């Protein structure tokens, strides 16, 4: 567990984080709505309290996260992106879940620890970062000590990420695109490439390359997820070049092959089919071309 910050420092960070909600700039959209009133919703359709879809031990994450006892996964509802192909759209786009106070969220964190999970894995946490900080602080007071995994789309504010320095142990961001035009078309994410890469730089500054314990379970570090979209739409060349030249050739990459036309994908001809074997193999070749050898490839 990375955190060595004091109670006073944590209290100050929580206070600063909640100030971000007043004229919301928790994420790069900076909607400016007052989420503290709980009746004002920005792009993410979220108010003051977090909304939780599920909490359970997840055995389908990357091997160092799932291990033998599972990753303690909390799926948070809503999202600050609008990916037309989202496979979790009932949660991310339709908001399926139950509103929780930070104290209730803290109880779920502690329950996952009691189940023996290797870590706490927060899925789509970006828009609830202040509330997560508060819940984590409450859980820590009661003995919570699992490594914290920040499982994000990667569309993050560096200002917000800095409040997590020394608290998040493992960053697990997506790098979805190398083309801002496609990021707008498929995810309504302005300036995605610049924002995403700045976020990844900050994440790497905080946690560095992946560190495993004696049982090959992740303790700390950065894991990049890259979903290979059909037709080369995910810009694999640009992503891998950036990682090799500006992050580290030792960075761990989860090269994901499981794309299928979910949610509104069939409204876009180019997204209305699965990624082909040839397209995925080409992504693997690009990864190798840039000397990126750490991580996981999948089968189609």
Image: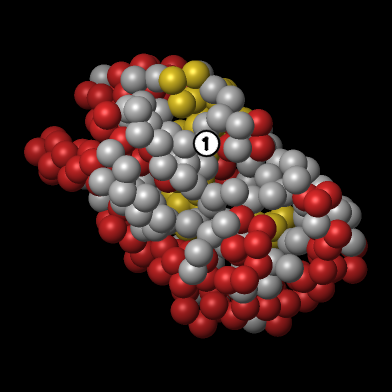
The image position of residue 237, as x and y in percent, is 68, 78
Quarter the N terminus occupies? top left
**Above or below, 158 relative to 150:** below
Which residue is depicted at the point 65% across and 31% down? 90
Which residue is depicted at the point 28% across and 39% down? 34
Which residue is depicted at the point 54% across and 22% down? 97
Report the front residue among 83 and 135: 83
The residue carrying mark 1 is 78
Inspect this view and state whether residue 62 appears: yes
Report the front residue among 88 and 212: 88
Inspect this view and state whether residue 253 appears: no
Report the front residue among 224 and 86: 86
Which residue is depicted at the point 61% across and 55% down? 187
Number of callouts: 1
Give left or right: position of 149 versus 144: right
The image position of residue 264, as x and y in percent, is 75, 45
The image position of residue 235, as x and y in percent, is 68, 72
Crowding at dot 1, Cα within 10 Å, few <14 / some 14-19 / many 20+, comes out as many
The image position of residue 165, as x and y in percent, is 28, 53
């Amino acid at each position: 567990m990375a955190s060595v910050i004091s109670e006073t420092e944590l209290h100050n960070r929580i206070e600063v984080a909640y100030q971000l909600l007043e004229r919301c700039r928790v994420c790069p959209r900076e909607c400016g709505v007052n989420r503290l009133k709980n009746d004002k919703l920005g792009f993410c359709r979220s108010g003051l309290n977090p909304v939780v879809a599920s909490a359970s031990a997840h055995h389908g994450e990357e091997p160092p996260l799932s291990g033998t006892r599972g990753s303690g996964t909390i799926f948070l509802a809503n999202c600050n992106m609008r990916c037309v192909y989202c496979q979790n759209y009932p949660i991310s786009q339709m908001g399926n879940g139950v509103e929780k106070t930070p104290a209730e969220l803290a109880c779920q964190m502690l329950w996952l620890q009691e189940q023996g999970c290797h870590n706490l894995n927060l899925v789509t946490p970006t828009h609830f970062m202040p509330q997560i900080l508060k819940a984590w602080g409450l859980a820590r007071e009661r003995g919570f000590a699992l490594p914290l995994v920040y499982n994000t789309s990667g569309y993050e504010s560096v200002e917000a990420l800095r409040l997590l320095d020394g608290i998040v142990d493992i960053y697990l961001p997506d790098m979805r695109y190398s083309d801002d035009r496609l990021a707008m078309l498929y995810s309504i994410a302005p300036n995605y490439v610049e924002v995403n890469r700045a976020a990844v730089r900050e994440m790497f500054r905080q946690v560095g390359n992946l560190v495993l314990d004696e049982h090959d379970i992740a303790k700390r570090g950065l894991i990049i997820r890259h979903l290979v979209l059909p037709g080369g739409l995910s810009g694999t060349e640009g992503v891998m070049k950036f990682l090799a030249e500006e992050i580290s050739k030792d960075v761990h990459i989860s090269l994901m092959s499981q794309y299928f036309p979910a949610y509104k994908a069939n409204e876009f001809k180019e997204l209305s089919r699965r990624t082909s074997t040839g397209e995925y193999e080409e992504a693997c070749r690009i990864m190798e071309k840039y000397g990126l050898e750490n991580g996981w490839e999948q089968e189609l």
